[in-house]
Amino acid sequence: MTIRPICITGEPVLHQRATEVTVFDDELRTLVADMYETMDKAPGVGLAAPQIGVGLRVFTYDYADDDGNERRGVIINPVLERGPIIDEPADEDTEIEGCLSVPGERFPLKRAEKVEITGLDLEQNPVHIEADGWFARIFQHEFDHLDGILYVDRLAEPWHEIATDVVEDNGWGKPGLSWLPGKDNLEG
Ligand code: ZN
């Protein structure tokens, strides 16, 4: 397994729709193994394939709920159904989100409280998960990556403008930038 560099916002693969997986082969198994290792090293609670430069509809997640139950897995070709998003400003303490492709930054974002996700695992078995709270947030965040959407794209003002400035100040927002978990000292 290999820890792979994580693309930073501006890399085109992060901003375009990823394509469906059609071949379940050793290459896909290696990709997913590398995604788990890269996610764990980052560390992150989720990682989408475009974040390591692969434009396929795959993400991994690893989340421990308040009861300490670890939810860890991979979802391939996911379909996401979102519950309603309450029309209120995001809470600046409890609804703060980050992204390994916008490393070291965090901004408040309102998300749906509940989602339902379906897809396939590596053995092409169906996956069906109902999630709420943070678990639901992770699925919305990772699913967005597969449609070329970063969480900073969804921010309300003033956060959207602040995030845009931060990206510019960091010299991001152009192709070719990445960081390597375990080597570069960044967190997201
Ligand atoms: Zn992300």
Image: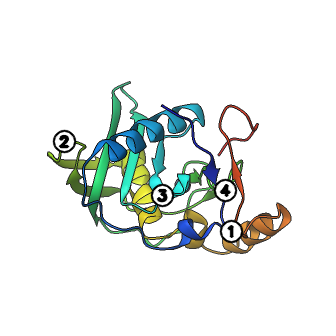
Quarter holding ligand 1:
bottom right
Disc 2 target residue: 123
In the image, taking residue 55 as reference, residue 103 lies left or right, namely: right
Q: Earlier in the sequence, mark 3 or mark 2?
A: 3
At label 1, counting other C-alpha atoms closer than 10 Å, the crowd grade (few under 14, some 14-19, many 20 or more) is some
Q: CA distance from mark 4 to mark 3?
A: 17 Å
Q: Which residue type carries mark 2?
A: Glu
Disc 3 target residue: 54
Disc 4 target residue: 102
In the image, taking residue 132 as reference, residue 156 lies left or right, namely: right
Q: Is mark 1 within 8 Å of ligand 1?
A: no
**Residue 30, percent from left and from top:** 39, 39
In this orientation, which residue lies closer to the viewer: 100 or 54? 54
3 vs 1, front mark: 3
Q: Earlier in the sequence, mark 4 or mark 3?
A: 3
Disc 1 target residue: 159
The colouring scheme, among rainbow, by chain, secondary structure or one colour, is rainbow
Contact check, label 4 and label 2, Cβ < 8 Å: no
Q: CA distance from mark 3 to mark 1?
A: 29 Å
Q: Earlier in the sequence, mark 1 or mark 4?
A: 4
Q: Which residue type carries mark 1?
A: Trp
1 vs 2, front mark: 2
Q: CA distance from mark 1 to mark 2?
A: 41 Å
